[in-house]
Amino acid sequence: MPALYGYRGYATVVDLTTGQYRRDPIPKEVLRSAIGGIGLGTWLLHRYGGPPVDHDGERLVPTARMRLLDSALEPDNPLIFVTSPLVGTRLTTSSKFAVMTRSPLTGFIADGLSSSHLAVELKRACGDALVITGRAERPSLLHVDVDGVPNVRPADHLMGLSTMDTESAVKRELDDGGRRPVRVACIGPAGENLVRFASIANDGGRQAGRCGPGAVMGSKNLKAIAVKGDPDADPPVAHPDALREYAHDLSRRSLGAATAKYRELGTIANVSVFNRLGTLPTRNFQQSTFEDAEAVSGESLHQTRATRSAHCANCTIGCEKVVTVGQKDKRARQGGEISARLEYESLFALGPLVGVGDPDAVIHAVRRCDELGLDTISAGGVIAWAMETAERGLLPSLDLGDPSSGANPALNFGDGVAVIDLLDDIGHRRGSLGNLLAEGSRLAAEQVGGGSESWAMQVKGLEMPGYEPRSLKTLALGLATTPRGACHNRTSAYDADFSPEVDRLTVDDRRGKIAADSEDFAAALDSLIWCKFLRRAFGDFWEESAAVYRMVTGWEDFDADELRRAAAHIADLKKGYNQRWGWQRTDDTLPGRTLTEPLADGVAAGIGLTTDELDAMIADYYRARGWSDGGRIDLDAIGL
């Protein structure tokens, strides 16, 4: 009988400074309480993340904040790739991994997820996690082959390449002609240049994007990671027959009405819906509807552009929409076509948020972000901030575009050409404006001043996603309190706002409990790891997921209540991590605009959110969590 089912029971730890590696065991009780994915990754961050930097005990002043953020780019900040007990089981949507580090954009926890064939190879070659510490002397490629032995190789020849070109070059270099290709994670120019919201790409352009893990990877002189594991290393599951039967049934349900929206139009369907509900952030959250929403809507793109569905690794849903357009923009040096993976957040951030209604320009911008290795939400958010700041006369010297062209165009909302020029400038830290915006909107606003902090639409330094919080009050609370910053993926609080459960335009004392429960639900999803788009295909998520966990691990006394406790524990671990790194009560808030300006248009025109209303919801949330009135957690009580 194997020692473990579903897990490998160890993490591979690589020190890039020395080139040495080791395999550290992970206790069974940790695996059971942290599950995998983001939960286990948070525990590993506590274990390998080093001591916190100094802060003043009240609030981080800008100089202290810069020390905190820059320390995330030091060698002792680990970069961690984490699998889960479901990886390798062939359950639909389960081929996912988490990327964990401390963010150079927020200074706090950074967690990202990606669906990828890389997840299976990581588990086979590296165990339950790959922990990367230190800094290589020169640009490097970390290669882990079927023997599970990490090898640090020179990668000078890869520097400057896009993410797509890097992946192709690594595969040409390392593939042995076998049936199973090597799987690659890499950074583009943005990661090399330490852009604070650089992403990590894998599987032909899929991104672990938010919070800047690509900058941490770049700070380690690590251009790419290439992994091919031994199929014989797959850990067994405890009840294979029962799991196979369940997997078949879940796949059938995944093709039903619960996922129809994602299969047919994908998340880009949200553009039309959100515009109608007055919750589509436009022109840096100055409006909540977009006059050109129809042109960039999912329905229109399907009718007017070549669009096909794409599936993540081991997924039956196929939510991703790949859109192809002609190479028409004025910077093109040659003809041909260009394709981009489109989902709502990228479409929102590089469309309505910056006022661009030309779908081809949006598609080109999304593609450029993927090539450079930039988080599309933060990229759109910081450009929207810059456009409004320029509009207000606070960016007198734009230094925009290709200097060799002699052009210095104005920076206006709706200018798709300027957006793509700026993306290139940001990704290469080119020019004074590109270098400023590469810091993210919070730091850029602190540098520019003039009141621009109030329209820097970020929480804890992370730019806002495509949901208008003034017309989604439960989500507003979730955005203010989630540990990684303004993130709709680490809370599903918007589900309540889009349901009859609450009035999305008002505040009441139920929201704290709803937000805490939704955060726990997301923690369970992100740790097992299931795709969120599968969530409505479960009859009872907690019961079914606990049953699957028993089938995989053989821990027969694990039930739905224990899974709920594990999810709440993971939320505590994440909050505890931020607290160790200087979190203060003032970090749980929303941008100034959100709390001072009512909505100007749409069906929710005139609706606002006051500081008192947000504070009351936050107090309810802390009580629901069992934290102090000031939002602090007892670190000893959670084993830290």
Image: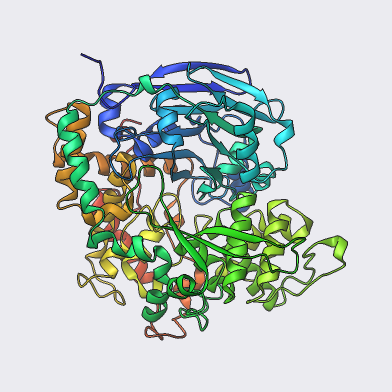
Task: Estimate the x, y position of residue 576 in percent, counting from the top left.
Answer: 38, 40
Instruction: Say which of 439 and 345 sits in front.
Output: 345
Question: In which quadrant will I find the C terminus?
Answer: top left
Residue furthest to the top in view is 1
Identified at 75% across, 69% down, the residue is: 330
Q: In the picture shown, does residue 66 fall above or below 303?
A: above
- Residue 110, position in %: x, y? 48, 44
Pinpoint residue 29: horizontal percent, then vertical percent.
26, 25
In the rendered image, the vertical position of residue 241 relative to residue 466, given as above or below: above
Decide if residue 626 is on the left or right side of residue 407: left
* For residue 293, above or below residue 82: below
Residue 551, quarter of the rendered image: top left
Within the image, what quadrant is residue 188 found in?
top right
Residue at 41% over, 47% down:
312
Residue 382 visible, this angle: no
Determine the residue positioned at 39% across, 66% down: 265
Q: In which quarter of the image is the N terminus?
A: top left
